[in-house]
Image: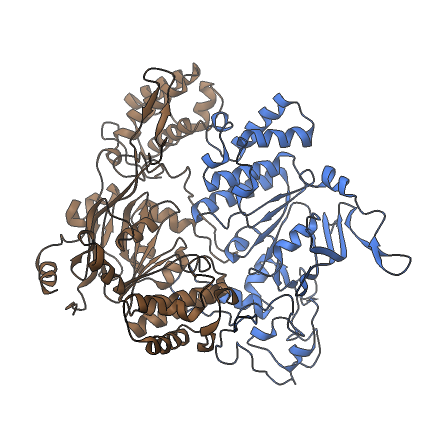
Amino acid sequence: MSEPLLSVENLKTQFFTEDGTVRAVDGISFDVYEGEIVGLVGESGAGKSVATSSLLRLVDSPGEIVGGEITFKGETIFGLEEGTSGEPRPRDDMLSEEEMRKQIRGREIAIIFQDPMESLNPVFTVGGQLREFIEINRGLSEEEARAEAIDMLREVGIPAPESRYDEYPHQFSGGMRQRVLIAMALACQPDLIIADEPTTALDVTVEGQILEMVTELQEKYDTSFIWVTHDMSVVAEICDRVNVMYLGEIIEHAEVDDLFYDTKHPYTQALLDSMPRPDRTVEELDPIKGVMPEAIDPPSGCRFHSRCPHAREVCREVHPEPRDLSDEGEPMHSAACVMYDAFDVGYEGSRPIETEATGGFSAGLTETEGDE
Amino acid sequence: MSGLGDDEPLLQVRNLCKYFDSDGGLFGGVTVDREFPFVARDPSKVRAVEDVSFDIKKGETLGLVGESGCGKSTLARTVLRLLEPTSGSVYFKGEDLATISGEPLRRKRQDMQMIFQDPQSSLDPRMKVGPIVEEPMQAHGMLDEEGREARAKELLEKVGLDPQHYNRYPHAFSGGQRQRVNLARALSVNPDFIVCDEPVSALDVSIQAQVLNTMQELQAEFDLTYLFIAHDLSVIRHISDRVAVMYLGQMVELADKEELFENPRHPYTRALLDAIPVPDPRSEGRTGLLTGDVPSPIDPPSGCRFRTRCPVLIQPEEFEMTESEWADVVTFQRAVKRRAFETTDRGEIRRRYFEDVPAGDAGTLVEDALSYIEEERWDEAEDLLTESFADASVCATDEPAYEVAPVHGDGRHYTACHRVRDEAIASGAAAELDAPGSGAIGEAGADD
């Protein structure tokens, strides 16, 4: 296979809060190749958004990328080396803040956020914002940039783009605003677009329109996407490969068909089982028991063991790293679960343990203050 | 007390309308013009809910779906009299809520509760969970202090929380648990009817399933009736007995769940169902997506409100085009309206939008429109096409209301689409459920 466009190795992002260190992203690795859509799925609190902002080095204090390596087209977006006295320091070949700003963000890697209203400035016209972005990033004159902006608006399906160019964001519907952001992301023809839950706030009909449009544009421009979502249906519809995140870790990685039809990790399975189906009537849903623990104090061993129906003693003790479980000659399918023989830590002989999933339903309250 | 039989509807909504003034405020609705009289005041109204009628039987769940902005929440609030209806009636256990107010209405509220979408903002952050659950009981003078505390603890347990959490503040709970507190609060006054306005859409899927299951258990245990609003059709399919579909303030289809999902008759319902993503990479994906945006409720389309986006608009009687010719004309008319293309070249447009330009009057009209476009007179081209094609259709001139025979089950199937007119078993007012006020309603009202 050719070189990956983006390669993430053992990325760790932590937040240093008063209550302790929150390990929001804890050692994730994945690749993105040219022209593919890679999904990043998980519930809220899984660390999806922190992972994507880390890719662009957009993590704000008290958060910090504390380890790992991010390589994009041969350039190092993030990398550490050991300093003279043993402390980690940025490597020399790591891009400077200015290089990140001028070369990477927007131009090479664009990002689309969930809430289109917050990403557009309410006091400037939609067209003006798009034009300015094109003007700065592509070095076009104002007139050329304007023509290009109108073309982009038409391309993403905005009706009557010439007259809507001069309108303000509040005059656009939610779906239209998201289209504008997609136009903005595509305007510099970046190699990679990170889409952070771009359709979550939209109605299904609009979501359908947008996904269809993205698929078309992706074929036309051959852009790669990292698609962040919590919705398995969206994953099924557009992704080529999928990474499933739970509590800061990638616990399963597979091609989309394998993920749905040859699910390995109990969490992925539980996630799929808990969804109501639009295409058939289900008598009772089978939810995942309990709630996701806090990333400030994750469970020992496998992080999912506290909610896992297959949990055994060994799950509490051994922390599994994802391993490739696919047969030879088949595309990679990795999962981090000691249930599989590849791990060989004595799961078979281990005693099953009481968890929220195996025992009764105890609502699993978050352990914060409240009794006073 | 209620004297309602099993088949008697608990709630009957008849021709309910709710309009909002869009000219509120000092300069609201004022437009400045270059010509005399320079300033005009436009007394336009947002027609959020228009002429909606339906029944809810005791113990059932009516699902209400529609896109954002279609008036679902306004309808729910108007039904509960949290908003004053502009016209129409809401009979709850035989009494018209639209006509009562003040203390009688307040007392009625004991039987009707509501659960909101955002579990965070519907709980007072400075009150402990226990008092939150007790407050409605206090307001309605139920039980004494000790009794209320005991009941609150019992309810917390019923909704799947630990009764020990009585003394915690809402911030110590997760989203799903907060929604459970909301459930306990709604249940505290022992209501018959709960309106749930998108209760699970802010929750993660796994948590969503837990809360939905709890809601179903509670319904069975306390014999509750739900009006369940959601935009997620998968959730609606899971929880509802009957489903109503709304578009731009009106009800377009109402039928039993199986019937609606397996045999949808209204093109909007079909489009909505086709748009649901299926969590299966081997499914064919979404087909026949709707184009365009929902029109403004200030000036909704005449006749069927869905006609401006409808994929199966009916051809006006004076033309005799084939189905595909008519489809081309409709696509072209909408493209001109949206200014979806730039070119003014006659040949180019013809190639793009028409396989064969229709013959006869229709063809002449299309040619006229093309001439306008060639001269860049877009507005005139748009008017010509809209007036002669879109506005001449029966969909634009008559408001549809039909009842068709169901294929699944034996419930009534109401659908507001002219396409079914030939097989309809009832139409007009007769299709929109029986008229109230007769028999049962009058008697029940007298009993109280």
Residue B73, position as x, y percentages in the image: 34, 51
Residue A325, position as x, y percentages in the image: 67, 68
Residue B418, position as x, y percentages in the image: 24, 41
The picture's colour for chain A is: blue
Is residue B311 shown above or below B125?
Answer: above
Give left or right: position of B171 versus A29.
left
Give the tally of numbered discs.
0
Residue B57 location, quadrant:
bottom left
Give left or right: position of A359 versus A187.
left
Give left or right: position of A268 versus B227.
right
Residue B255, position as x, y percentages in the image: 27, 56
Residue A235 location, quadrant:
bottom right
Residue B110 vs residue A265, the one in the foreground: B110
Residue B114 location, quadrant:
bottom left
Is residue B129 shown above or below A114?
Answer: below
Residue A217 vs residue B67, the one in the foreground: B67
Residue B185 vs residue A271, the one in the foreground: B185
Give left or right: position of A98 versus A257.
right
Is residue B332 shown above or below A267?
Answer: above
Residue B107 vs residue B72, the one in the foreground: B107
Q: Is residue B55 visible?
A: no
What letter labels the chain drawn in brown?
A: B
Q: State the residue lying farthest toward the top.
A: B375
Question: What residue appears at the point 21 percent right and 43 percent down from the top-left corner?
Answer: B421
